[in-house]
Image (cartoon, rainbow, N blue to C red):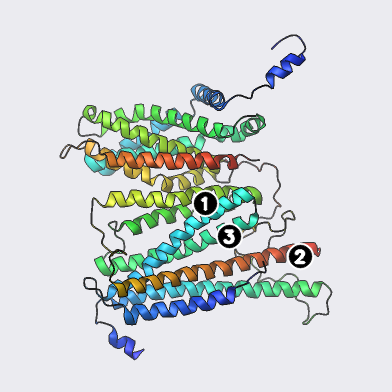
């Protein structure tokens, strides 16, 4: 903010180069993370939901420990549904407070919003898992979590990217419709079935007491393919959601 | 049909096969029936339009509103030739207010 | 293009193809060794499934055309194609359940990956119309629906891959495969597939004609100043 009236040089400089994709993404991501840090709207809720769900599962299944397929199933279902909570809230502030309009007026690549929001959702998912996975190991898991952890982290990383991409796309789709809280999960859950398949099948041998196994590459490959395909598609179609 | 019945092996799932094909044809026929209903509705609307346009009517003009009508075509939207109808067929209820191009009310 | 052009030809060919297909299924194709007469459902269920899935993917391709050309007619075609695939998909699930009941005694089996994938795809596309009806602005509705159709169209093959990978661990293919068919069965299958594709094209054409007529009717009413 200068005190002098703008000169021709200033005008020329400010209109010289619109910010590049990385700069735009950085700015948007910073804003979203800052807002989340201050309002704590999404992540604490998601984490609390996950831990509560584990408790519910204990009573629903009437078991003290789970392992193998059961453990993988509980973990992935809980993560998925907690992610839905985050997805629902992802664009709400922008839709309600005019964030879309401001963004559309700026001379930036519109796909930057997709990348920024997906990275934000990814960040939320990572924090969610930092809470949920140890909680799972504490509350429900029969086998020690430590030896499963490296493989589990790889699976979680790939799956999180898929959830982030699809979650962001569906959140943008659903946020400006009626009944957005219903439509979001309804659209996202079938789309995320391959992630559940890959994640659960890959985690199951890691979490197993009876037949412990290693990480199978085919599921990592499936998750990676899913991330790639839908990442590209989301990047291609996202612009069309922002048009008005 | 007798030759067909004679070729059916006894009790090896012929009932299920029949059920499957019947389901298929039933759904196709239901669709045909729905199309027939829509066609008659279109014909009625065209005839009404024709009468209203001032041509010598072939039949006495139909009254404008009938109690049995479910979902007359929604005409409140802005004139856009080739605009997509919002409802797939007339049996859904219609939203009364015209849509506007501004951002719609948010529902939480 | 005038509304309803080619409908008569399509309808007659569909009826003819259906007749030939049925004749082949019940009088020409041999009874299969393992499953017996029940296997005849295969000629109904699998062609319908293939046509329905291709319809979903086709709806996605039409949605791409819509987004690129902004021509609302592509959106109409995309909508009709997806709608018709949904209807045929219901028949696929019902006939699949009947087949499972006859084969295994259960109305649903998880061991048949095609059927399972189909269920997931149907659950996804069942949200297509609620999504459309939740958006009032017609232009935005068409745009958002096209985005959905493209994403879902890409999802169909991805989903099949994932489900097939997962179930290959559990059971081998149960309800019959369409590969390694002896020639008479392959011929019957091919004709059935063609007949179902023609049926799909005919039903879509009828639906398109009905919709376009209705649009024309509404705009005529408006132009003439009535209502």
Q: Is residue C76 depicted above or below A195 in this figure?
A: below
Q: Residue lying furthest front in this view?
A: C183
**Foreground: C65 or B103?**
C65
As measured in the structure, the alpha-carbon distance from the residue carrying label 1 to the one carrying label 3 is: 12 Å
- Horizontal side of C222 relative to A221 (left or right) equals right
Q: Quadrant of residue A71?
A: top left
Q: Are marks 3 and 2 in contact (CB under 8 Å)?
A: no
As measured in the structure, the alpha-carbon distance from the residue carrying label 1 to the one carrying label 2 is: 32 Å
Mark 1 or 3 closer to N-term?
3
**Is circle 1 on the same chain as circle 2?**
yes
Q: Secondary structure at mark 3?
A: helix
**Foreground: B67 or A209?**
A209
Is any part of residue A64 visible from this angle?
A: no
- Horizontal side of A181 relative to A219 (left or right) equals right
**Is circle 3 on the same chain as circle 2?**
yes
Counting from the top left corner in percent of width and height, residue C95 is at: 37, 68
Closer to the eye: label 1 or 2: 1
Q: Secondary structure at mark 2?
A: helix
């Amino acid at each position: 903010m200068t005190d002098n009236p703008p000169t021709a040089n200033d005008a020329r400089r400010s209109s010289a180069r619109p910010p590049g994709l990385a700069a735009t993404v950085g700015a948007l991501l910073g804003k979203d993370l800052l807002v989340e840090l201050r309002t704590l709207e999404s992540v604490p809720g998601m984490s609390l939901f996950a831990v509560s769900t584990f408790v519910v599962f204990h009573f629903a299944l009437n078991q003290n420990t789970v392992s193998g397929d059961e453990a993988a199933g509980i973990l992935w279902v809980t993560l998925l549904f907690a992610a839905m909570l985050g997805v629902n809230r992802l664009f709400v502030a922008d839709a309600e407070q005019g964030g879309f309009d401001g963004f559309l007026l700026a001379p930036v690549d519109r796909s930057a919003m997709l990348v920024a929001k997906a990275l934000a959702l990814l960040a939320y998912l990572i924090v969610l898992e930092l809470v949920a996975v140890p909680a799972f190991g504490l509350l429900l898991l029969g086998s020690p979590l430590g030896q499963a952890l490296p493989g589990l982290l790889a699976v979680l990383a790939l799956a999180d990217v898929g959830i982030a991409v699809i979650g962001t796309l569906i959140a943008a789709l659903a946020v400006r419709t009626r009944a957005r809280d219903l439509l979001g999960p309804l659209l996202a859950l079938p789309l995320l079935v391959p992630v559940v398949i890959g994640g659960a099948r890959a985690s199951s041998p890691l979490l197993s007491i009876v037949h412990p196994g290693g990480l199978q590459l085919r599921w990592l490959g499936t998750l990676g393919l899913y991330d790639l395909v839908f990442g590209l598609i989301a990047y291609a179609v996202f612009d069309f959601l922002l048009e008005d | 049909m007798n030759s067909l019945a004679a070729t059916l092996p006894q009790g090896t799932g012929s009932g299920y096969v029949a059920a499957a094909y019947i389901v298929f044809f039933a759904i196709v026929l239901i669709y045909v029936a729905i199309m027939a209903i829509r066609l008659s509705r279109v014909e009625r609307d065209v005839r009404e339009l024709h009468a209203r346009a001032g041509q010598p009517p072939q039949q006495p003009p139909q009254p404008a509103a009938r109690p049995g009508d479910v979902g007359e075509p929604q005409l409140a939207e802005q004139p856009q030739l080739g605009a997509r109808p919002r409802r797939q067929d007339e049996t859904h209820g219609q939203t009364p207010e015209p849509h506007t191009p501004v951002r719609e009310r948010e529902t939480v | 293009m005038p509304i309803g052009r080619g409908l008569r030809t399509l309808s007659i060919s569909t009826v003819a193809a259906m007749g030939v297909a049925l004749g082949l299924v019940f009088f020409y194709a041999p009874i299969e060794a393992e499953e017996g007469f029940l296997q005849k459902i295969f000629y109904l269920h699998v062609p319908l499934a293939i046509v329905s899935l291709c319809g979903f993917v086709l709806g996605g391709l039409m949605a791409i055309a819509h987004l690129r050309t902004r021509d609302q007619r592509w959106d109409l075609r995309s909508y009709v194609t997806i709608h018709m695939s949904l209807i045929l998909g219901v028949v696929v699930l019902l006939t699949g359940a009947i087949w499972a009941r006859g084969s295994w005694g259960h109305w649903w089996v998880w061991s048949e990956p095609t059927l399972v994938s189909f269920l997931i795809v149907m659950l996804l596309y069942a949200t297509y119309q609620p999504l459309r009806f939740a958006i009032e602005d017609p232009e935005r509705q068409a745009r958002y629906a096209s985005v959905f159709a493209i994403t879902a169209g890409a999802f169909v093959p991805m989903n099949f891959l994932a489900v097939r990978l997962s179930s290959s661990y559990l059971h081998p293919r149960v309800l019959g495969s369409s590969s390694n068919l002896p020639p008479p069965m392959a011929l019957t299958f091919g004709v059935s597939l063609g007949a179902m594709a023609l049926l799909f094209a005919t039903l879509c054409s009828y639906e398109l004609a009905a919709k376009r007529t209705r649009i024309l009717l509404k705009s005529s009413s408006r132009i003439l100043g009535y209502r």
